[in-house]
Amino acid sequence: MNKTIGILALQGNFSLHAKRIEELGAQSVEVRDCSLLESIDGIIIPGGESTTLLKLLDTKFRTTLTEKISKGFPVFATCAGLILLANKVINPEQTSLNLLDIEVERNSYGRQIDSFITKDLSWTKEGEEIKNNLNNNHETLEAVFIRAPKIKSIGKKVISFLTYNDTPVLVKQNNILACSFHPELSKEAYSIHELFLASL
Amino acid sequence: MTNTNENKNTRRLKVGLAEMLKGGVIMDVVNAEEAKIAEDAGAVAVMALERVPSDIRKDGGVARMASIKVIQEIMKVSSIPVMAKVRIGHFAEAQILEELGVDYIDESEVLTPADEEFHIDKYEFKTPFVCGAKNLGEALRRISEGAAMIRTKGEAGSGNIVEAVRHMRKIMSEIRLIKSAGNEELVTIAKNMGAPVEIVSMVKESGLPVPNFAAGGVATPADAALMMQMGAESVFVGSGIFKSEDPAARAHAIVQSVTHYNNPAKLLEASKDLKEAMPGLDIHLLKDEERMQERGW
């Protein structure tokens, strides 16, 4: 696979995403402004602090990136990245890029002491179909939730692939793939990055 | 909502939160108002304490964990992680902070040590710990006690970056030394460093097993960029922000400089138009007992 994935490297766990992408045979490059946007095939918005990421996205970068994504540029957003893309953010309310039709609650499972790792995940019918085409589809999937957000509701155009306690944790809306956990922190979650690469 | 397949408070989750804080700035705050300024400026976490290090230095006396009321107020207004400091060896202060629900505990040389011989057994706690280090041996001792994040000690409250530079250079060069060492050298290296050989072997295999941040003396955007270029993965700023003449602007500038640490044009942009930085101290004029970095071992 000769794809190059940009990893938004303003703040957060961008280096481990780069590692996963390269382990799956694609190239990765750190993206901190508009300059590389034309030379990448897709972008990952990593976990970190969404308030910090918002501060660091200056107007030009934010406008360019938003426009590109709304025109169909592939993006994979995890945790804080998902918060950044959501149409509505609560706890507390904050601005976002308004690209993904979900409502999301920040720090919904509690503080760090409530962070957790779980294998209690269920693929939806749509999720099963997509996952069966992947190389890593037999792995036991594990999800790492750190001060994680919760998807409270999803719009009509949004498809839920994976749920935890009946709450969607991995969703897709056209060119946008987003999850509320950290696939880059688990060796038992390759399939999530693979899902993104396969969609390019 | 209990699930048998769920794991909580594991080492991976503790280090995981540290991973999320990479490329960010953790700011010392002494009240809710400062916490708000810090979050608005783009801080990735705040460190709740009663006095910033430069005031602790000035006031003297015993410096302890911050009052619960102050920490609670800071937790209430912050949507980002809240850390708080405990005295070295003071596991009861740590138990209280864990009960309170702070996101990270800093077993810190900035406060007056409670135990001059032993650090806290950090494996006993659900809450993750960060600890300071002057060199790799010290970092690995703290990791072997359960620390999930390491920061340089630097010289807190000095406004002088020289000690953080010294500690970061030392840690990075010792990591390089271990990486190039033969397996037969590891036991001797471990003995000389005073660190368990198992962790020394981990360093040889894949570097420091926890994130390595800079702290102690950061006062300007350039200081922060310097530490990042030397290999720090994030930066703690203590007195440097709220003891300067323009806390909000300076906090924002330091956040920018940590993200764009390799881009001089952006660093210039972040550095211009700032007012006076905090006053700095000449390290060589500090008496031995005034050097906070000598606390802990």
Image (cartoon, grey):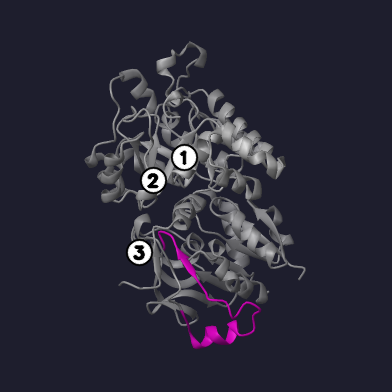
In the rendered image, residue B37, in percent from the top left (x then y), is placed at 38, 41
For label 3, the crowd category at 10 Å Cα-Cα, with few meaning under 14, some 14 to 19 and many 20 or more, is some
What amino acid does circle 1 point to?
Answer: Arg
In the rendered image, residue B25, in percent from the top left (x then y), is placed at 48, 41
For label 1, the crowd category at 10 Å Cα-Cα, with few meaning under 14, some 14 to 19 and many 20 or more, is many
Q: Name the side, left or right, on which B99 lies relative to A87.
A: left
User: Front-most of A110 and A93?
Assistant: A110
Q: Which residue is mark 1?
A: B142
Residue shown at the point (61%, 75%) measured from the top left: A195
In the rendered image, residue B11, in percent from the top left (x then y), is placed at 45, 55
Q: Are marks 3 and 2 on the same chain?
A: no
Q: Is residue A140 magenta?
A: yes
Chain label for disc 1: B
Mark 3 or 1, closer to the camera: 1
Q: Is residue B35 above or below residue A14?
A: above
Task: Identify the magenta region.
Answer: A122-148
Quadrant of the snapshot with the N terminus of chain A: bottom right
Q: Name the side, left or right, on which A44 lies relative to B115.
A: right
How far apart are the two marked residues, 2 and 1, measured between alpha carbons? 9 Å
Q: Which residue is mark 3?
A: A109
Q: Can residue B271 be seen here?
A: no
In the rendered structure, are the residues bearing label 3 and label 2 in contact, judged by CB atoms less than 8 Å apart? no
Q: Which residue is mark 2?
A: B122
Q: Name the side, left or right, on which B266 lies relative to B90.
A: right
